[in-house]
Amino acid sequence: MRGFSVGSTLLTAVLLAGTALAQAPSGKLVLYTSQPQKDAQETIAAFTKAVPGVQVDFVRDGTTQLMSKLRAEFAAGAPQPDLLLIADAMTMEQLKAENRLAAYQQAPVAGLPEGAFDKDFTYFGTKFITTGIIYNTKAKKPESWKDLLAADAKGQVVLPSPLYSGAAAIHMGTLGGLKDIGLGYFESLAQNGAVAVQGNGQVRTQVAGGQKLYGIIVDFMGLNAKKDGSPVDFVFPKEGVTVVTEPVALLSTAKNPAAAKAFIDFILSAEGQKFAASQGYLPMRADVPAPEGFPARDAIKVLPAPVQSLLKDDQANKKRFADAFGG
């Protein structure tokens, strides 16, 4: 009887293991992401180490370019991605309104702050990414957004274009809604000789290389450049900073929803959040420490960003930017 009992236990264990293996996510997962190339590759490598049965193919571009590509695929009836990991909730809200996102009610949202994910569980913020000012250390340290309009900043400012970057679109819409700054701020930047480039990476390159003294940039790029030894520093301006949460979402047309859900599980887990922190991102979960160089979370003044009004004004804002900077 004892031998039968042990044998039954072993058999049960083998059967359960076989069932788990059969249910484990596998196959190809297609990801569209606006993460920097290196960060995207590292994130995928960390995920596939945790879930080795999944092979990830990814397309990396700015949020605006990715959405143009995806909309062309929707129109052709052949959307390719299972999963989106892009800069801003504004774009996700638009996709949700079009029924392009699938709800994932079982997503591991415990530990995420209120408002960090969609109430209907269609998209989930993965980190906090603020936009501030990077400056070359041979220049005067700025304290305010308005310092970029000063005479000593004339022709010395570079910024990412909202025609390309989702974070830049949120930044423009949020600052544009402030009474003491407003959309005219961006036209004043253009009049002061500021130059718009496609993405944050080009801002980092120009300020670190000394071609420009000041730049508007996402926090992790500025702080990582300083950490890597570039002659730059990063400022959280006194008026406050704009923020995006780099949300992740499962498409309703996903061909491999099981693998996509596994990716969401990983990136929201404590392990995934610690990995994001190791890349220099401010993690979404409060129980995961911030990377070196960040002030305490409660010391960062975040400007309110009403997603619905930002979405409503987005196209008009982009036209106004294009009129001022070209594009």
Image: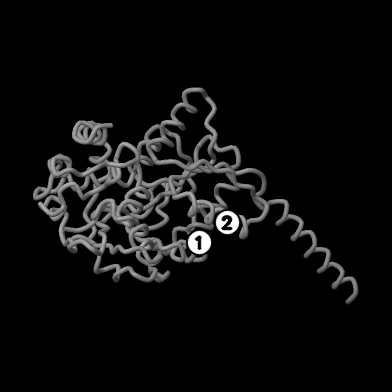
Residue 114, quarter of picture: bottom left
- Residue 172 location in percent, x, y? 23, 44
Q: Quadrant of the C terminus?
A: top left
Colour pattern of the rendering? one colour
Q: Is residue 154 left or right of residue 163?
A: left
Name the residue: 25% across, 64% down: 137
Q: Is residue 216 left or right of residue 291?
A: left
Type of amino acid under label 1: Gly
Name the residue that disc number 1 marks: 272
Q: 172 or 125: nearer the eye?
A: 172
Type of amino acid under label 2: Phe
Which residue reaches farthest bottom?
Answer: 2
Going from N to C along the chain, the mark reached first, 1 or 2, is 2
- Residue 264 location in percent, x, y? 51, 52
Is residue 277 shown above or below 125? below
Name the residue that disc number 2 marks: 47
Is residue 122 shown above or below 269? above
Q: Assign a secondary structure to mark 2.
A: helix
Labelled pair 1, 2 in contact (Cβ < 8 Å)? yes
- Residue 37 location in percent, x, y? 48, 49
The CA span between labels 1 and 2 is 8 Å
